[in-house]
Image: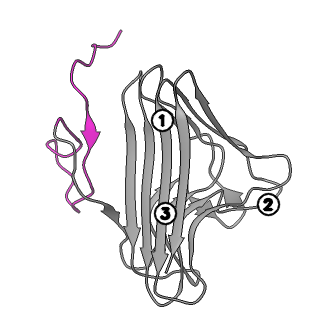
């Protein structure tokens, strides 16, 4: 049996050091997850592989908020993306939590603020984001090239992105390319 968690836990970013003190904190990070050299995305749910992508990412908050912030200013694969997902996510904020994504892509290569289902092929999987009496807010901002897209959710065939807001919940999708 496990021990009940009575305070929210937040993962901290990789600092290049493996230690017993690295990992979780009760202080919520205020900034964005930023890409590192050689990677196109600030924050990724899943991982691209030559044969497809990982899927099956699950986030259940137990009615707390799920907040993801990613920013990228460096290109790989000829694209810059703030937040990338590869399909197959199951994200549920319970009976009162919110799901919020804030993605910023900025640079001289094609930029995307948020790219949902970035790997679009027959190996893709459907994704579900769900709230009850909470809100889903997906905001992507891209700038710097002539081929920018603020928010992109292009799925493959019968493997959609499902957004559910029941009760008093709302869904807002925002994309801005400048």
Horizontal relation, residue 64 to residue 125: left or right: left
Task: Examine the rendering and report whether any part of residue 82 can be seen.
Answer: no
Q: CA distance from mark 3 to mark 1?
A: 16 Å
Is residue 134 visible in the rendered image? The answer is yes
CB contact under 8 Å: marks 2 and 3: no
Kindly state the secondary structure of the residue where label 1 is placed.
Answer: strand
Q: Nearer the viewer, mark 2 or mark 1?
A: 1
Where is residue 2? Give x, y as percent.
Answer: 33, 13
Residue at mark 1 = 135
Q: Closer to the camera, 52 or 7?
A: 7
Residue sitting at 43 percent across and 34 percent down?
98
Check disc 3 and report its element: helix, strand or loop.
strand
Q: Which residue in the protein does label 3 denote?
A: 140
Q: Which residues are magenta?
A: 1-26
Q: What label does residue 40 carry, if any?
A: none
* Residue at which label 2 appears: 121
As for residue 24 lying within the magenta part, the answer is yes
Q: In the rendered structure, does residue 89 fall within the stretch colored magenta? A: no
- Distance from Cα at disc 2 to Cα at disc 3: 23 Å
First of labels 2, 3 by sequence position: 2
Give the structural element (helix, strand or loop) at label 2: loop
Q: Quadrant of residue 31?
A: bottom left
Q: Position of residue 138 (x, y in %)?
A: 50, 51
């Amino acid at each position: 049996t496990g021990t009940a968690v009575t305070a929210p836990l937040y993962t901290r970013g990789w600092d290049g050091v493996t230690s017993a003190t690295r990992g979780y904190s009760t202080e919520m990070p205020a900034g964005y997850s930023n890409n590192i050299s050689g990677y196109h995305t600030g924050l990724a749910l899943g991982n691209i592989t030559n044969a497809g992508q990982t899927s099956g990412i699950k986030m259940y908050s137990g009615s707390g908020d799920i907040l993801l912030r990613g920013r990228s200013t460096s290109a790989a694969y000829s694209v810059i993306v703030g937040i990338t997902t590869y399909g197959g996510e199951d994200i549920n904020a319970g009976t009162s939590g919110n799901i919020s994504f804030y993605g910023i892509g900025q640079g001289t290569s094609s930029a995307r603020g948020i790219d949902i289902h970035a790997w679009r092929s027959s190996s893709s999987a459907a994704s579900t984001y769900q709230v009850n009496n909470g809100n889903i807010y997906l905001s992507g901002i891209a700038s710097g090239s002539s081929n920018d897209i603020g928010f992109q959710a292009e799925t493959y065939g019968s493997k959609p992105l499902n957004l559910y807001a029941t009760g008093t919940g709302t869904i807002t999708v925002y994309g801005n390319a400048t």
